[in-house]
Structure formats: structure tokens, C-alpha cells
Image: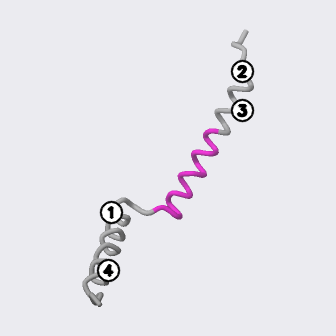
Amino acid sequence: MSKPVNLNRFRKDKARADKKARADENAVKFGRTKAEKDRARAEENLAERRLDGHKSEE
């Protein structure tokens, strides 16, 4: 005789796996790498410093 299976656990495990797969797809499709984020942040800081440097003191 086989061991009884908890259907609730099976259902929840399947839902978790589906959610993880969808999250991985979205990460590939929409996500940015850490290097890309750091570069964008550095460019924003540089642009802000340049703008502040061109402001007049009047």
C-alpha cells in the first residue's frame, strides 16, 4: 500500500513553483543588473553635480 499524499501540500507546492517561474521570467524580461543600476545612479549624480555647478549665486 502506498503512502497517503497531502493534496493541500501538493497544491501549495505547485502554486509556489508556478509563482517562482513567473518571477524568474519577469526578472529576465524587466529586471536590470546591479551594474546597470549603479551606472544609472552614477550618471544621475554626475548630471546633478554639473547642474549645481552651473547655477548662479544671484
Tell me the crowding category of disc 1: few under 14, some 14 to 19, or many 20 or more residues within 10 angstroms, Cα based: few
Q: Is residue 21 magenta?
A: yes
Residue located beneath label 1 in the image: 35
Residue located beneath label 2 in the image: 6
| 1 or 2: mark nearer the eye | 1
The spot of residue 5 in percent (x, y) is 71, 19
Q: Earlier in the sequence, mark 2 or mark 4?
A: 2
Q: In which quarter of the image is residue 32?
A: bottom left
Q: What residue type is labelled 2?
A: Asn
- Label 1 to label 3, Cα distance in Å? 38 Å
Residue located beneath label 3 in the image: 11
The spot of residue 26 in percent (x, y) is 56, 58
Tell me the crowding category of disc 3: few under 14, some 14 to 19, or many 20 or more residues within 10 angstroms, Cα based: few
Q: Which of marks 1 and 3 is nearer the N terminus?
A: 3
Q: What residue type is labelled 4?
A: Ala
Question: Which stretch appears magenta?
Answer: 16-31
The spot of residue 33 in percent (x, y) is 39, 61
18 versus 1 height, above or below: below
- Label 1 to label 2, Cα distance in Å? 44 Å
Residue located beneath label 4 in the image: 47
Q: Is mark 1 on a helix, strand or loop?
A: helix
Residue in front for this viewpoint, 45 or 5? 45
Q: Earlier in the sequence, mark 3 or mark 2?
A: 2
Q: Which amino acid does label 3 sit on?
A: Arg
Taking the image as shown, residue 32 lies to the left or right of residue 49, namely right
Label 2–label 4 contact, CB within 8 A: no
| 4 or 1: mark nearer the eye | 4
- Label 3 to label 2, Cα distance in Å? 9 Å
For the point 69% across and 13% down, which residue is it?
Answer: 3
Farthest residue, direction front: 58
Residue in front for this viewpoint, 39 or 15? 39
For the point 56% across and 56% down, which residue is it?
Answer: 25
